């Protein structure tokens, strides 16, 4: 090497170092936001039921990608779906790089993985057995994979259909496919930066294909668009979002989108582990609903038509899980988007004839119980969300209450059991051993008679308030009467909600801890009477009265957290697998329990709420693979974590009031949609100092353990002084209003 050459390479080396440093510095600046605390692996090993999936996606967007494996401790990856139709529903289009011999066994081959890096905006992994490195970054309706092959063996992109459909090689550098699932179709269009050749395909169905890459090529970029309209629309979605081959640009946009979402809430104090739990929970609160409007058009699974619209069309909502915490959280953070979501439900009602429950991509999947669209709509409306058709929304929830069946896992015309409910004010239960005579009752889900009565009582209270908003006093009276139906299944002499047969007799024998068969489904929804005793969100004072007054209700609430299982955990979980995160009979791992620790505020003992919430957060929500105590349900559970770690919670959706708990951080600042900020300061906060000693709201003494949404939305500062012993005199006089005592529409 001569001197000139040496100087040239020295210059080149310095230049490369500078470029590398600048790129690293730029990336560090991008990652200086709250995204650095997000760990999508948290909770990715289910305690009993489903793990979370470490999904890589933009907030509320169509493309959601993750490695398909049993759970996070499974070291083998089967493939990556190009997207999913819904959380825990149909996955679409399997993609995986492959090296080696092509044969029928190659379809079932999984790949040992290591060095995995996962964040909301980027994914990377090494497949150990073939030395392949995979990277992925998402756009809204498209995605970008980059594959670096490490093996000298033959190289392929392996693709297969996960439902029904076919895959085609359109040209040497473009692939397309279609899948049929649940009565609709999904499409993809993909391009590569190097020529491909199909070398193996199931020629009869075209559901499997290996696309050979030249032996001289070590790196392949694979970008794609997805659509629920057509391959051509998928191609257009790709062109709109990823027009070139600059993966870094796509990644930067994804990072920016997550920065905007995650920086809506900023925290100070707390441990690094608590920050990871908090921001991972906030990230999961953006997995659904998803906007499937594809640049001016969307396909609706509710009338099987393509619609032209310049408005978002949101799908994928498990409303039984999300009306409690996820939707109220998004109402604070993104009220305009919340109105668009509700308007999407209104459009689904107009298109299908029924207000949906679980509004999935392909149509309503009416899982669980209740008419909770009513609670969601009222809650948003009472918090100032107005960009939806209130009259039509009311029409839909009213029709579902009076004309649709209330049976679990059903939507459609009323049955004989619904006629009984209308006449008698409760869903009748079968006596032990009695055969089900009503054909419409789900064979596995049963009647869930007590839960149906309780949940629809609450929803009918919500409909009464919506009727009042529309000036319909006749309907208001009708639905307030129906809202009192919960009293018909509370057995005062036993102090528990209790199933009742069609003749009005209490079911015997009955064990409040264990009766009802698998999941308690003869009488309840996934939980027992100990949990559902507190499921009267709209009339807490009425519930306390049935229990014998507030003092006895508080004793009963204490007992919930202390009562024995009465059997082995094995026997309990064999029958109640959803009863995870147990503290006594309290079930942290299931949604109907979320509001229960905050009920102490309504009983004049807010210090017990503070004690319970801190214990529950510290015990069950940790920053590891086991860090979620039950089915997370696409943000349903983690939104509860966001609220509780911030230090407050909406006990009754529909009542614009937040109950104060015990914040995990010294300072929480929420950027509101109106440009203002709401800040909660917790002075002297620590693991030991979990009790509120005193409070001020905007400089004025606050002696109540609650505040209103109006006070939050106006911005301002809530100051709490924390200590290590309870102040049993704070928050004991001006108690949070029960729903029947608080009606801002009157």
Image: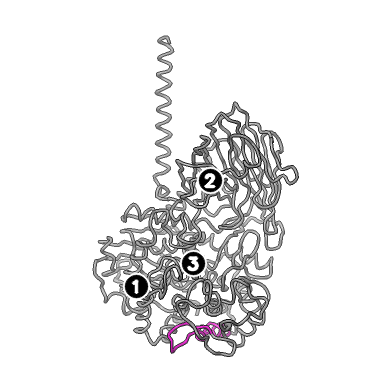
**Mark earlier in primary sequence (1, 2):** 2
Circle number at residue 395: none
- Nearer-the-camera pick, 650 or 519: 519
Which element carries disc 1, helix, strand or loop?
loop
Q: Earlier in the sequence, mark 3 or mark 2?
A: 2
Nearest the viewer among 73 and 730 is 73
Q: Which mark is residue 77?
A: 2
Image quadrant holding the N terminus, namely top left
Colour mapping used in the image = one colour
Which comes before the other along the chain, label 3 or label 1?
Answer: 3
- Residue range of the region highlighted in magenta in the rendering: 477-499
Circle 1 residue: 705
Between 375 and 389, the one lying in front of the other is 375
The residue carrying mark 3 is: 577
Marks 3 & 2, CB-CB < 8 Å contact: no
On whether residue 482 falls in the magenta region, the answer is: yes
The alpha-carbon separation of the residues under discs 1 and 2 comes to 48 Å
């Amino acid at each position: 090497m001569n001197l000139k050459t040496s100087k040239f390479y020295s210059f080149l080396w310095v230049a490369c170092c500078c470029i590398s440093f600048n790129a690293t510095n730029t990336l560090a600046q991008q990652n200086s936001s709250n995204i650095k605390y997000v760990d999508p692996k948290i909770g990715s090993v289910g305690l009993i039921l489903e793990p979370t999936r470490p999904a890589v996606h933009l907030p509320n967007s169509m493309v959601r990608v993750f490695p398909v494996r049993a759970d996070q401790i499974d070291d083998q990856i089967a493939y990556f779906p190009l997207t999913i139709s819904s959380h825990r529903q149909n996955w679409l289009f399997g993609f995986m790089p492959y090296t080696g011999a092509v044969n029928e066994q190659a379809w079932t081959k999984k790949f040992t993985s290591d060095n995995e890096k996962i964040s909301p905006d980027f994914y990377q992994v090494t497949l150990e057995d073939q030395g392949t490195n995979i990277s992925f970054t998402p756009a809204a309706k498209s995605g970008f994979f980059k594959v670096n092959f490490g093996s000298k063996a033959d190289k392929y992109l392996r693709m297969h259909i996960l439902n029904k459909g076919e895959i085609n090689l359109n040209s040497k550098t473009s692939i397309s496919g279609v899948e049929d699932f649940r009565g609709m179709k999904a499409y993809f269009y993909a391009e590569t930066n190097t020529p491909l050749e199909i070398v193996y395909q199931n020629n009869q169905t075209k559901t499997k294909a290996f696309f050979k890459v030249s032996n001289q090529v070590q790196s392949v970029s694979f970008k794609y668009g997805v659509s629920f309209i057509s391959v051509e629309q998928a191609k257009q979605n790709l062109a709109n979002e990823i027009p070139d081959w600059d993966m870094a640009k796509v990644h930067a946009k994804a990072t920016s989108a997550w920065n905007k979402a995650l920086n809506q809430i900023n925290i100070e104090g707390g441990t690094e582990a608590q920050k990871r739990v908090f921001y991972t929970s906030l990230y999961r609160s953006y997995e659904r609903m998803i906007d499937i409007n594809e640049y001016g058009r969307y396909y609706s699974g509710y009338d099987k038509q393509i619609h032209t619209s310049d408005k978002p069309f949101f799908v994928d909502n498990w409303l039984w899980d999300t009306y409690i915490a996820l939707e109220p959280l998004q109402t604070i953070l993104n009220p305009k988007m919340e109105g668009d979501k509700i308007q999407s439900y209104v459009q689904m009602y107009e298109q299908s004839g029924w207000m949906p429950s679980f509004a999935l991509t392909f149509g309503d999947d009416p899982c669980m119980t209740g008419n909770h669209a009513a609670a969601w709509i009222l809650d948003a409306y009472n918090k100032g969300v107005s960009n939806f058709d209130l009259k039509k929304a009311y029409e839909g929830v009213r029709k579902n209450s009076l004309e649709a069946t209330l049976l679990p896992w059903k939507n459609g015309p009323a049955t004989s059991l619904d006629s009984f409910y209308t006449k008698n004010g409760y869903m009748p239960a079968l006596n032990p051993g009695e055969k089900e005579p009503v054909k419409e009752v789900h064979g596995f889900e049963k009647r869930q008679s007590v839960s149906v009565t309780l949940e629809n009582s609450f929803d009918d209270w919500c409909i009464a308030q919506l009727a009042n908003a529309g000036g319909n006093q006749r309907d208001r009276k009708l639905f307030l009467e129906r809202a009192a139906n919960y009293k018909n299944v509370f057995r005062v002499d036993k102090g528990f909600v209790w199933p009742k047969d069609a003749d009005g007799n209490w079911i015997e024998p009955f064990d409040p801890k264990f009766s009802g068969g698998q999941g308690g489904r003869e009488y309840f929804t996934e939980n027992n009477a100990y949990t559902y005793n507190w499921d009267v969100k709209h009339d807490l004072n009425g519930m306390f009265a049935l229990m014998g007054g507030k003092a006895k209700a508080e004793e009963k609430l204490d007992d919930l957290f202390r009562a024995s299982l009465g059997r082995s955990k094995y026997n309990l979980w064999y029958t109640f697998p959803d009863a995870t995160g147990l503290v006594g009979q309290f079930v942290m791992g299931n949604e109907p329990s979320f509001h229960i620790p905050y009920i102490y505020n309504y009983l004049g003992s807010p210090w017990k709420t503070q004690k319970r919430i801190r214990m529950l957060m510290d015990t069950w929500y940790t920053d590891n693979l086991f860090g979620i105590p039950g089915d997370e349900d696409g943000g349903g559970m983690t939104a509860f974590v966001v609220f509780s770690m911030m230090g407050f919670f909406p006990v009754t959706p529909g009542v614009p009031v937040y109950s104060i708990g015990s914040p995990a951080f010294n300072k929480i600042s929420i950027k509101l949609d109106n440009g203002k900020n709401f800040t909660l300061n917790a002075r002297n906060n620590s693991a030991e100092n979990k009790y509120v000693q005193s409070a001020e709201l905007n400089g004025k003494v606050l002696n109540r353990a609650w505040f209103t949404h109006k006070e939050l939305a106006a911005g301002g500062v809530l100051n709490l002084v924390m200590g290590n012993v309870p102040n049993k005199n704070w928050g004991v006089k001006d108690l949070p209003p029960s729903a029947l005592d608080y009606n801002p529409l009157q």
